[in-house]
Amino acid sequence: MKKPSDEESERFDFGKNWSYFLNHIDERVVEEAKSSLHAMLGLDGDGLQGKSFLDIGSGSGLFSLAARLSGARVRSFDLDSHSVQCTRELKRRYLPDDDAWTIEARSILDNDLGAVLGQFDVVYSWGVLHHTGRLWQALEHAVELVGETGTLYIAIYNDQERTSIRWKRIKRLYNVLPRWLRFLVLYPALLRIWGPTTVRELPRGRLFGTWRTYSEHNRGMSPWRDVVDWVGGYPFEVAKPEEVVDFCRGHNLELIRLKTCGGGRGCNEYVFSRRVADK
């Protein structure tokens, strides 16, 4: 048996975390995902009708499903085999016989993506490119898949400088530890992430109120699964908003919407539109 490389052995099992999240998905979560997708893309309910939609790093498959239910022709891929299985399971639950949604195992770092996949009206990759270990190469490949008048919607971890360096060390430690010892990293991180919010809510009589309503304001996501994803998410790279914007402008993409995490921990979200060259 081939021995895994250091990069492979330290990589977080994103798909296994998504498999637990599948138990959380219901009609309410699907509607919240659709609403957040439409809002960021600036679309109404039928805004994706007939468009081609590429989901890079589909994870649970939730946003591929949201795009398909909004009328798009969807192609989903993920490097993680468990994520591919999760996406296929979600399709089986909601759209088992739909031939306008294809799912496959593939990496955004593959050099032949443009020739194999072609280009799309919407290229979507939320919180994925920074986990490849080659952020800028992954972003360049994603940009190449955007059609002539297409849209790119990405989310990339914010660069907090020294704080990001500390989190990178924590994430790597989590992944090199035996599974039965990972709680030594996970639980203190949970307290660091959620402790201040809990303390602020206590005197207001809203203990765990933000936790309970988390999915309503965070794309239908689960707070616990997001904590596990954050602590374990390795490889881990970050970028400042101006770096991402300048890179995409250099590839003929114009920023049309930016939602930042306020300079803190988390992802900045970007929507770019392909500029049409003057004739």
Image: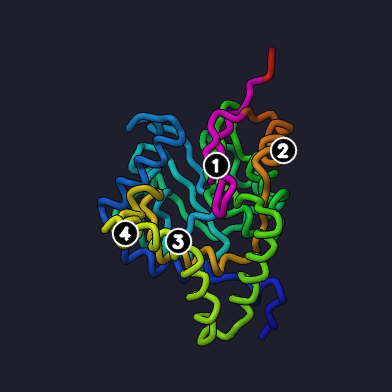
Q: Hey, what amino acid is under mark 1?
A: Thr
Q: Give the distance between the C-alpha atoms of the residues marked 4 and 3, in whole angstroms.
A: 12 Å
Q: At x 66% / y 51%, what residue is drawn?
A: 159
Q: Is residue 78 left or right of residue 74?
A: right
Between 62 and 36, which is closer to the camera in this rendering?
A: 36
Q: Which residue is mark 3?
A: 196
Q: Are marks 3 and 2 in contact (CB under 8 Å)?
A: no
Foreground mark, 3 or 1? 3
Which span of residues is magenta-colored? 255-276
Foreground mark, 4 or 1? 4
Q: Hey, what amino acid is under mark 4?
A: Pro
Q: Which residue is mark 1?
A: 260
| First-in-chain label (2 vs 1) | 2
User: Is residue 74 on the magenta stretch?
Assistant: no
* Circle number at residue 203: 4
Between 199 and 246, which is closer to the camera in this rendering?
A: 199
Q: Which residue is mark 2?
A: 247
Foreground mark, 4 or 3? 4
Q: Position of residue 193 (x, y in %)?
A: 49, 63
Q: Are marks 3 and 1 in contact (CB under 8 Å)?
A: no
Question: Secondary structure under badge 3?
Answer: helix
Q: Position of residue 121 (x, y in %)?
A: 52, 33
User: Is residue 265 on the magenta stretch?
Assistant: yes
Q: Hey, what amino acid is under mark 2?
A: Phe
Q: Residues within 10 Å of mark 3 (few under 14, many from 20)?
A: few
